[in-house]
Amino acid sequence: MCGIVGVISKQPVNQLIYDALLLLQHRGQDAAGIVTMLDTKYHMHKARGMVRDVFRTRNMRGLPGSVGLGQTRYPTAGNAYSEEEAQPFYVNAPYGIVLVHNGNLTNAQALKQELFDIDRRHINTESDTEVLINVLAHELELSARDLPLTPEAIFKAVSGVHRRIRGSYAVITLIAGHGLLAFRDPYGIRPLSMSEVQGADGAREVMVASESVAIEGTGHRVARDVAPGEAVFIDLDGNVHAQQCAANPRLFPCMFEFVYLARPDSVMDGISVYQARLNMGETLAQRLISTMPPSEIDVVIPIPESSRPSAMQLAQKIGKPYREGFVKNRYVGRTFIMPGQEVRQKSVRQKLNAIELEFKGRNVLLVDDSIVRGNTSREIVQMAREAGAKKVYLASAAPPVRFPNVYGIDMPTREELVAYGRTSEEVRQYIGADALIYQDVDAMKRVVKALNPKIDGFEASCFDGVYITGDISAADFEALETQRRAQPAEEEGPDRSRLALQGAEDRS
């Protein structure tokens, strides 16, 4: 996952984009970048690190212009630690294009060869975003041979992109001297919202971003979501042109956005993330009641941060007190892998600390948003026991994660997933809990879909093994896992996207 934003205004946009990226920091913390356009010249700054560290006053001064875009990067393809793979990406022909991308192309390797053999375009990095921008550039070349560049020609190019690429992609791009283009994959896997504001002077300001919180948090009002397969082109005067560019668009947003990735105060595809998590807590409570007597539970405690709404709703449903039993250290930075389980355990305990008062002598139900590798869950269960809990039960607001994700979420290999090839009882034994209660897949889908019946379904492949783009094979899994094993390990262990992110407090 990544966070992306684009703005067209009549005022300087560097500060607005910076503020929006801070609100999207939870979507990626490996790198950040901003590009602005003044006349037809691009001004760009990008680097590895958090938004607040990448951009200093001198960098902001070097970003003039009333049009721009930005990205916070969470790498799931390519070299995670390469400075040159930070976004935005740029190609100078045709017109001069810069692009930011949230998602993951599943046919990037085939496209790379196709670009070289047929389109005569060279890809210099392992990033699928460089592949995407070159495919778009080539399609623009084919559809718009003459100036001026029209919205119709742009939409024709996006249609060509949809025909060629597979996977998940929410894209924002600038075309020098023409305007801003945003589009979304035909399944709407990755989110994209937009706002339109008209000032007292008649000037229009249009903003596109990954989550509604980036729009609302900068003083704008969300107008709508970009539809699956739709392209939206905003010219330099702020006029909005939109067209459906996919042959058979269907709305299948990523379920993991609602489980964990997105901030709870965001609304995506008409669904409140917070309400979705409350609903998951209710169905989890029903699952728990069918599994064990609630009378055996003394207190419900969330594992910070994303599980809080589900834990609160579960506690209310079963009539048990909800308590905060763990305090999170928000100021622990990255934890780098060191050999030995002792070091891994220490890193978890630096980030979380148990409040003994809430555990001592009690049967405790811990609620987490999901369980991926299980190492962190095992350590937290042990922390609860050491704090004096008589029994420790664990409930997951998400179903078992049994399959890899290929659409832009950094999941471990199959062998590293604790639920892969194991029964729930075997997972319980591994984690060391006295009971383990998982969310039901169908119930989860049902209660989230109820918040917007117009949704066709959900991309929930890590739970149900269904890859909706229909192009994923066993060979693809092997290639993906081989690539992952070959990369140097930087982040500490199990749930990289949970405990290692400094910005997780933005979700609370």
Image (cartoon, grey):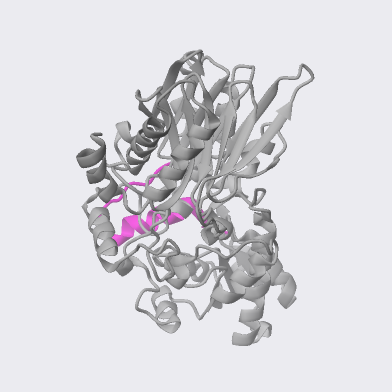
Can you tell which quarter of the image residue 215 is in? top right
Q: Residue at x 44, y 27 (%)?
A: 54
For residue 337: magenta? yes
For residue 456: magenta? no
User: x, y percentage for residue 414?
Assistant: 32, 67
Query: In the figure, 401 relative to 411: above or below?
Result: below
Q: Residue at x 45, y 64 (%)?
A: 468
Q: Which residues are magenta?
A: 333-354
User: x, y percentage for residue 433?
Assistant: 48, 77
User: x, y percentage for residue 89?
Assistant: 38, 31
Report whether 61 appears left or right of 483: right
Q: Mark yes or no: residue 323 visible.
A: no
Can you tell which quarter of the image residue 441 is in? bottom right
Pick whichever, 177 or 209, lies toward us. Answer: 177
Query: In the figure, 473 relative to 196: above or below?
Result: below
Total residue callouts: 0
Q: Mark yes or no: residue 445 visible.
A: yes
Query: In the figure, 181 relative to 501: above or below?
Result: above
Q: Residue at x 43, y 33 (%)?
A: 99
User: x, y percentage for residue 208?
Assistant: 59, 36
Q: Residue at x 37, y 45 (%)?
A: 75
Pick whichever, 4 or 117, lies toward us. Answer: 117
Pick whichever, 235 or 47, lies toward us. Answer: 235
The furthest residue to the right: 200
